[in-house]
Image (cartoon, rainbow, N blue to C red):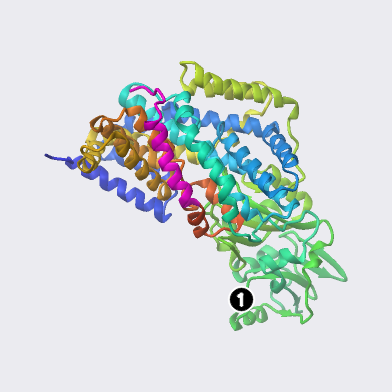
Amino acid sequence: MEVFSLTAVWLTLILLLMAGLLMSGALRPDLAALILALGLSFSGLLSPQEAFSGFSRSAVIALIALFILTAGLNRTGVSRALGERLSRWAGDSPGRLVAGMTLLSASLSLAMNSVTAAAVVMPMAVQAARRIGLAPSRILIPIAYGALLGGMPTLFTTANLLLSGLMRDHYGRSLTMLDFIRAGLLPAALGLLWVIGVTWRTLPERSPAGQLMRLHRLNRELAELYGLQDGLVELLVEPDSPLCGLSLVESQLASRHSVTVIGIRRKGHLLLSPSSSESLQAGDVLLVAAGPEGTAPFEQALRDLGLRPLPRPVSPEVLEEGEAGLMEVLLSPHTTLIGRTLRDLRFRERYGLQVLAIWREGRPIRARLADERLRFGDALLVYGPWERIRLLQGDPEFIVLQSNGEPLRTSRRIPAIVIMAGVILASALTSRSVAEVTMAGAVLMILAGCLTMEEAYRAIEWPTVFMVAGLLPLSIAMTRTGAAEGLGTVLLYGLAGAPPWVSVLVFTGIAAALTQVLSASVTAVVWGPIALRAAATLGVPPAEMGLAVALATSAAFLTPMAHPANALVMGAGGYRPRDFLRAGWPLWLLSVGAITASTVGWGLGLPR
């Protein structure tokens, strides 16, 4: 029996190549998805209309609408109000604080994208944890896991929307909100109990980026954390220096020598956070944060530039003077800065702030910052005028871990809650498509004044939209070429004669494993058609198999790369990759077992 056709083999090779590129980080996921769509079209496997049909799919429309709905909740302060009440309820109890913030993250994930839910809760959790002396490393992984678990019993996650669409394409019936509620409540509840009762107690206590920040002063602990106590030096500009008369940007001190000028002492006055257009003069004393060079070539380069290090020690407390200060910020889920360097961004000119260090994977980076490509999860230690720092609070590129708060439209809070509740109820109780319901809710959010049209456009995570739209036609190609049926047949040989629950367990485990190295969206689109094709042969109702695979894509607990929510908390929590593996493997096993039991063994009355 021929398992694979030639076109199926060709498509499988394309898939393996794409998976390799995604895992290696050689290509952005959205770009890889668009290349895949083009490849399917140019190869003749799909027509041009089919290759780009993802942009018109209801899953993509619903995804866009959900981003807008989420922005409406955030802009009106609904999420923040819940966080403040939970913080007051927790008091000085670490266990209650972890429980409250984890449940808040899970609850928000019922109505919004999981990574957005984690991003909303994280700043509140860091502030509350510091107030009671709890290391943020004990609370941030639970928040990320809570967001993932909260995405199980809802239709409003990307992978669940995709599997619902695949069910409609293959069997003419979409998975509904009620299907996900009935199948997802058990694994979500058991997972949350484990996280609240066990996981947070096993996490390490660390002093990561974000834990020691202050709004109005730089304390010695923060200086030690980033290594600034060794990197602050004073350089005297000699009369014969070739830098005399050049502006700071023209001097290329930061870009070529990893020397960031924090202040200029001139005629007895210290100018902190000088403009990049400030000209250097003979006799200036430059207060700089130098990368950890300490080598003879570095010192020789300074002499060639006519800069003489002064022997007197420099205390980091000098940075507390004036109207400038330090702040730690994270790259937000909406950022467009991933993969770009500070030099590309002209960060200092664009934001009027200087990046003194980048916190990545549990350690600070201070050398060659201008050429360091930004990664999701990076924390930036920025220095500059407070008014400039406060502007970052409203910038969608960043998350400020502690802030004075941006103006919120609290008067529109009730309409936002009513609209979101209406969307959830309509999705569960009416026959309208999820795209219709969510887009109607998004339009109502704008009409009700919860956010402006410009804010709605900024809230949409376009990289995610393009990635999903580019991936969706893959399911058509897998079905047409026989790749889905062929790959499923390979598993059918091993599962022949096995009870249905064993088959669901195997397909669930494979989906949960693939999610650790691929994104949930890729896993849903690649593994979903295979599982649905195999379901009928294995005697498993397609709805049960589809739900099991969809829920399994939320079990992204083992690596920081498995889900953006994990990567988001990595820098702020000072985590290392092994921390996710140690904390996540019991939860992963529990989730796979609970998903299998929930979809097969509990008689939930799912359509057969």
Q: Quadrant of residue 309?
A: bottom right
For this orientation, the residue located farthest to the left is 1
Q: Measured along the vertical axis of the image, is residue 302 above or below residue 70?
A: below
Q: Amino acid at mark 1?
A: Glu
The residue identified by callout 1 is: 293
**Closer to the camera, 166 or 305?**
166
What is the quadrant of the N terminus in the image?
top left
Q: Could you tell whether 238 is left or right of 114 in the image?
A: right
Q: Is residue 607 magenta?
A: yes
For this orientation, the residue located farthest to the right is 268
Residue at 53% from the left image edge and 54% from the top image edge: 375
Expressed as whole percent of the image width and height from the top left, the position of residue 149 reads 52, 39
Expressed as whole percent of the image width and height from the top left, the position of residue 445 reads 63, 24
What is the quadrant of the C terminus in the image?
top left
Q: Could you tell whether 267 is left or right of 57 in the image?
A: right
**Closer to the camera, 594 or 293?**
594
Q: Quadrant of residue 266?
A: bottom right
Residue at 79% from the left image edge and 71% from the top image edge: 315
Expressed as whole percent of the image width and height from the top left, the position of residue 151 reads 51, 36
Q: Quadrant of residue 258?
A: bottom right
Q: Which residues are magenta?
A: 584-608
Residue at 73% from the left image edge and 37% from the top image edge: 85
Q: Is residue 413 magenta?
A: no
Answer few, some or many: residues within 10 Å of disc 1's Cα (few below 14, many 20 plus, some between 14 and 19): some
Q: Secondary structure at mark 1?
A: loop
Q: Measured along the vertical axis of the image, is residue 396 above or below residue 78?
A: below
- Majority SS type along the magenta span: helix
